[in-house]
Image (spheres, rainbow, N blue to C red):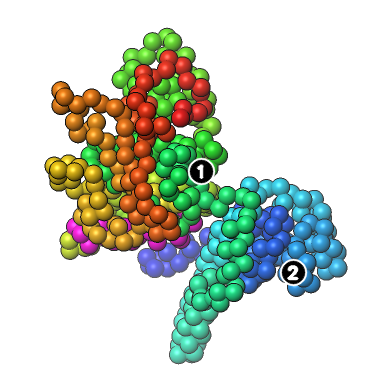
Amino acid sequence: MTTASSAASDRYAERMLPRDVDAERSLLGAMLLSGESMVEAAAVVPAEAFSAPRHAVIWEAFLRTTQAGSPADVALVQSALIAMGELESIGGMGTLIELAEIVPAAVNWRWYARCVLLAHRRRLLIEAADNAKRTAYDGGDVDAAIDTLSAELGALQSIERRRPEPVGKVLPRVLDEIFSEEPTGIATGLRELDATMQPMRPGQQIIIGATTGMGKSSLAMTIALRIADSGGAALFVSCEMRTEELTRRLIAARTGLSTSRLERPSSADAKAIAAASGSIDALPLSLHYAPGIALTQLAGDVKTWAGKHPGGLVVVDYLQLVRDPGHRSRETEVAAVSRGLKALAGEAGVIMLACSQLNREVNHRASALPTLSDLRDSGAIEQDADVVLLLHREDALRWKDPDYVCNGQAKVLVAKQRNGATGLALLRWDACRMLFLSGGSARPTAAPKQVELGEIPV
């Protein structure tokens, strides 16, 4: 009779050991494009971390080249492989050229290295567990097996674990960022906001806070769309709106047609929609409708996406709708979600842009401008965030007032910025496109009958 435990064991026995060949190839290609990074990479990635034998051989050639004091370019790695007698075994010069051509950005090598090391750790964990299981089944020395397993697990924990670094070792990386001709962060694309706000970087958590109806989802979508337009990858996770609704907003943004006109488009509208669909289809933008999603599930979804889009933007709309069961109070649950999203930004190597509700009382004060203390449910949101943007539109509050003239102006307060100054950005709200645009000091004009497809007007 087969027991449940033995059935589970048999099921796992037939599975292939974890491996990430794409990450291995990308890491090798990144080193060929940026050989200067090899010294740092060699310190954290051993050759045995590669599951494919030919990849391990190429990495050994990289190590030999680096130890000789030379950057790991294609020609020098080829020479090292010839000296090792391994050039033909890895597929010849063609393999090196192919590796150098597959990497979109060499600056993402740290993410590729993490993926390679993660698969390596999984294989080692399986091997350690198999050895312990074999000893237990065969009647071997249990105490010795436990000691061996403890040692193997200790060694396993040391792989990729961050350790203190001398500042002199960190300094060259920072100087490279400062003097690099390539941008080291991603701008929002809204010039008034970018004038105050530092470029966004992977590992950061940025909060957009606003009360209901101010347009925090639209501001997040505006930023995601501008980043996707510039070629950057973005993932929009909505706990409220279905992907179809989000896509309608994208169509409105591209065509200038209001969402109400999309319900019954004219023949001219239909042509504009068809023309806009091509640019929307090409966007590196992913949509995810996740009502009531748990933090653990969200982390898995984000890490899976980030594996293909390292350094991308992840929008969570909105923070208070993400669940983390098991807490005694709402405040501690929201605090745990906030901390979890911040940790996820670092673990997945993404920019985390999370929307957050503000307390409704702010709308009833003499000055309706929000402050950091208005962040709803938990003070941890402010503490965890690297940047806090607070959105306010007077039009959203006073549009029923007969003495008030709507001007389309939106105020975005950079209320907290860990590595920069605070300030105020004036934007313009475009109700037809449901977007925020540059030019906040100007009064809104009627939406043009035609817009240049593929671009958001500024």
Residue 304 seen in the figure: no
At 51% from the left and 23% from the top, the residue drawn is: 453
* Residue 233: image location, x then y, percent: 51, 43
Residue extending farthest to the top is 267
Residue 184 seen in the figure: yes
- The front one of 209 and 92 is 209
- The front one of 405 and 356 is 405
* Residue 443: image location, x then y, percent: 34, 25
Image-quadrant location for residue 331 = bottom left
Q: Which mark is residue 66?
A: 2
Specify whether residue 344 is painted magenta: yes
- The front one of 172 and 329 is 172
From the viewer's perspective, tell me whether residue 360 is left or right of residue 132: left
Q: How crowded is mark 1: few (under 14 residues within 10 Å), some or many (20 or more)?
A: many
* Residue 367: image location, x then y, percent: 19, 43
Specify whether residue 77 is painted magenta: no
Q: Which mark is residue 233?
A: 1
At 68% from the left and 65% from the top, the residue drawn is: 38
The residues tagged by marks 1 and 2 sit, at their Cα atoms, a distance apart of 33 Å
> What residue span does the magenta drawing correspond to?
330-350
Amino acid marked by disc 1: Ala
